[in-house]
Image (cartoon, helix red, strand yellow):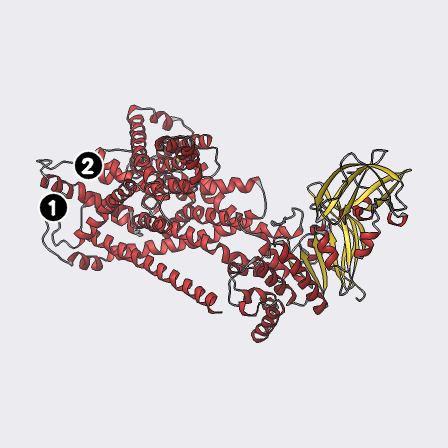
Amino acid sequence: MGESILQLRQIRKSFDNTEVLKGIDLEVAQGEFITLLGASGCGKTTTLRIIAGLELPDAGQVILEGQDITNREPNKRDVNTVFQNYALFPHMNVSDNVGYGLKIRKVPKAEIERKVEQALRLVQLEEYGKRMPDQLSGGQKQRIAIARAVINEPKVLLLDEPLGALDLKLRRQMQLELKRLQKRLGITFIYITHDQEEAINMSDRIGVMHEGILEQLGTPNEVYYQPQTSYVADFVGNANILHKNGETFAIRSENILMNGETVCTREAVVVEKSFAGGQLRILFRLPDGQTLTASRYGIDNDLQPGQKVKIGWDAKDAVKVIDNDKDENHK
Amino acid sequence: MTKTKITSNSRRRSGNVGLMIPMYVFTILFVALPILYLFLLSFLQRAQVWGVDFTFTLDNYKRILEPLYLDTFWQSLKLAFTATFFVALIGYPYGYFMAKMNAVWKRRMLLLIMIPFWTSALIRLYGWIIVFRSNGVLDKILMGLHLTKQPLKLLYTYPAVVVGMVYSLLPFMILAVYSSAEKLDASLVEASRDLGASAWKAFWTVSFRLTLPGLLSGVVLSFIPSMGLFFIADILGGNKIVLVGSVIQEQITKGRNQPFAAALSAVLMILTSVMIRLYRKITGTSQLEGMM
Amino acid sequence: MKKKKWPFVYVALITVLTYIPILLTVVYSFNASKLTSVWEGFSLKWYRELFRDRDLGEALINSLILAVLSCAFAVLIGTSGALGMSRRKRKLDDAVAYVSTLPIMIPEIILGMVFLSVFSLMGLPFGMVTLVIAHTTFCVPYVFTMVRARLVGMDRSLEEAALDLGATKWQVFRDVILPQILPAILSGVLLAFAMSFDDVVISIFVTGPKVNTLPVKIYTKLKTGVTPEINALATVMLFVILLCLAGAYVLGRKSQTAVEKAAGGK
């Protein structure tokens, strides 16, 4: 990964008197795969569109390779977007779709043909050149949309939740493919998703966004094991938020220990058990009223609601965080 | 997000003002202004030889209240109502049944309806002259079947005019009903049958109610033109049927009285807008469904 | 559910009734006799008269030119208007849109009357100029409403994708928007052309002494006396329409097979 290729400085944006972006600062390194992660409405898509030039920020700057492109038209930026709904031109066939950017730049016909063939091979759809978009499946459309974007060799590729409409298995497959593609091409990818699994699987760095603010920017490890705020702690993985002496701590549910380990010194009562996210989850209530969730593999164990158990955790697993989450005491 | 937002404060959007100019200029100059001028004209006086005298007067409107002209308006309204009634009676089932056909037939039917529409209205009327004329085709058939002994003098009668008008207006009604009936959800009818309704009741309470907007827009689409299709009355009715439209035309060409013609037109226009208002109130829609 | 026959019978009956006048016209166009009460044998003499009739020929050309010009202007005005309005929300736009549709909502005599007075006032020469203006006013709404309806449902992200790939605003229009609104424009033009070509009332009011459109000419002929030439004319027009429809059908099938070939080939 190289030096900084894109910077966002204090980007602000409001829509109809609602502030959607409250001052975003971001530095993206050349060749990295960075993901903006957050729930709907957090501003991640707006940020992407501002980078693409499809929206103008109310304040702040967008700097690409040292040049201020904040006010530049989207067709004059060396940036390409993969849209969430693919946005393939319905009246053009696959080859014409993929080669559109080159045609606009008046690349000679023979070379366009060559490059289109290359791009289609890259996404493993070589024979599909003459097909029309409405004859493609969702996954195929997605790959054509990617081919259409990368063929222009942009400095930065923006991807707006491209896998959202695909089923789980296909999504997982595409995640790996996208990652491989990125490594192969060496292009900087800025990816958007609300799926933390996706973010962790693919990214070099993750930027967690919440209500128009970039709460934390770091590697998947950092964001997962060292969350800085209670929101991040809870959004990425399921963390328990505990308040003690005016301070707030986050403890991952898999780190809650039970059954006689030395650290298990706290009294707790089992409230209920459930099965979610592929794991067994046990909800405990502490004497002071706060609740904690422990998670284990398997679908059941011997504990019963109402039972008194001793639980605990390693001190190192309790991370101090800034409390900013409105809903406390998540299950 | 599947639909993308367009910001209202983007500088990019300002380039579109230019796009609006042709439409604005044309509409204001050739639609809005003329209609306003019409109203103005109706309050003016006719000049001695030709043209208009710019003195204000209410005489034109007073003249409309004369029995002769009131009667003419009434005749036009009566004819319009009659024609529209039959158009609805014949056209509604047609459009409704059309919507129930399979895709192939639907396309064929649409084509079949549109073909006469494409030929000249006048020529189609001429066809009716052939049918209705004394010793014409209809007479020949009826006499041949020994249903009548003498030729029926159907041409130049009121029924002939009504038939001519219904014939011209039918496609509008059919298309309006069809487009409404096409969107009808078959499962709603099935649900009502499932709940015990007879076939007739199911139709009346579900299908008819839901296709009502189509019927009503068809009524509007038929009624409004019927107030002005004076040439049908002219050709099929001869001099016996005098409509507002004919009067207006006469006033301009023979009477050289633009202001009076304007007053007549203004009254007609007000009647028409009242109809449209009524329709909007009943259906609560802002666009005519039949307009595709 | 049992398949009932009577709906089809009803539809068939009405359809037949609507075609009877047309068929009669065609049949009688070959009648050697001038009167419809007598059949004198098969003859093409009315067709010969038709092609010899200079006036009718001139009127036909006038009507065609008029329709083409009016539709051309209607496309320019209606399309630009619809495009402009699709991007912004102004109350004034809605008002102008409503007013622009008045020409098809108010009875034609009123429109004719209105144009007559205004054109007199403006001192415009009565003839092709006034005809084109008048016809354009009622052609615009057809194109405008169809294009606007199409634009409302259009996917905006396609335009953004084109911009993103480097297209200028003009190229976005040419490559993305235009192909999508073309069917709507065509539908509007088809309707508008028919309305213009067939217009009697408005044309009567705004035509000039030297210019005759086909419908007006036919109307005056019908009023003065019956000539079976008209039957011949009707038959010819019908034939032309059927030819166009057949042509459109063949073109439609051709493009469909081309796509099928391309898809199934690989």
How crowded pointer 1 is (Cα within 10 Å; few <14, some 14-19, many 20+) is rated as: some
Where residue C41 sits: x, y (%)? 10, 55
Q: Where does residue B90 sit, x and y in percent of width and height?
A: 30, 37
User: Total number of numbered labels?
Assistant: 2
Q: Along the horizontal axis of the image, is B24 left or right of B92?
A: right
Question: Can you see residue B267?
Answer: no
Q: Which residue lies most toward the bottom here?
A: A110
Which mark lies nearer to you, 1 or 2? 1
What's the residue type where badge 2 is placed? Tyr
Query: Residue A278: percent from the left, percent from the top?
Result: 70, 49
Both labels 1 and 2 in a single chain:
no
Q: Amino acid at mark 1?
A: Ser
Most foreground residue, B172 or C236: B172
Local crowd size for mark 2, using a 10 Å CA cut-off: few (<14), some (14–19), many (≥20): many
Q: Residue furthest front?
A: A302
Residue at (51%, 62%) from the top-left corner?
A: A132
Query: In terms of depth relative to the viewer, which is nearer, A298 or A46?
Result: A298
> Dot 1: what SS?
loop
Q: Is residue A180 above or below residue C114?
A: below
- Report the front residue among A298 and A91: A298
Would you name the residue on which mark 1 appears? C37
The answer to the question of whether label 1 and label 2 lie on touching residues, with beta carbons closer than 8 A, is no
The percent position of residue A1, horizontal first and vertical second, equals 79, 66
Chain containing the residue with disc 1: C
Q: Which residue is mark 2?
A: B156
- Say if A309 sits above or below B102 in the image: above
**In terms of image quadrants, where is residue A148?**
bottom right
Q: CA distance from mark 1 to mark 2?
A: 17 Å
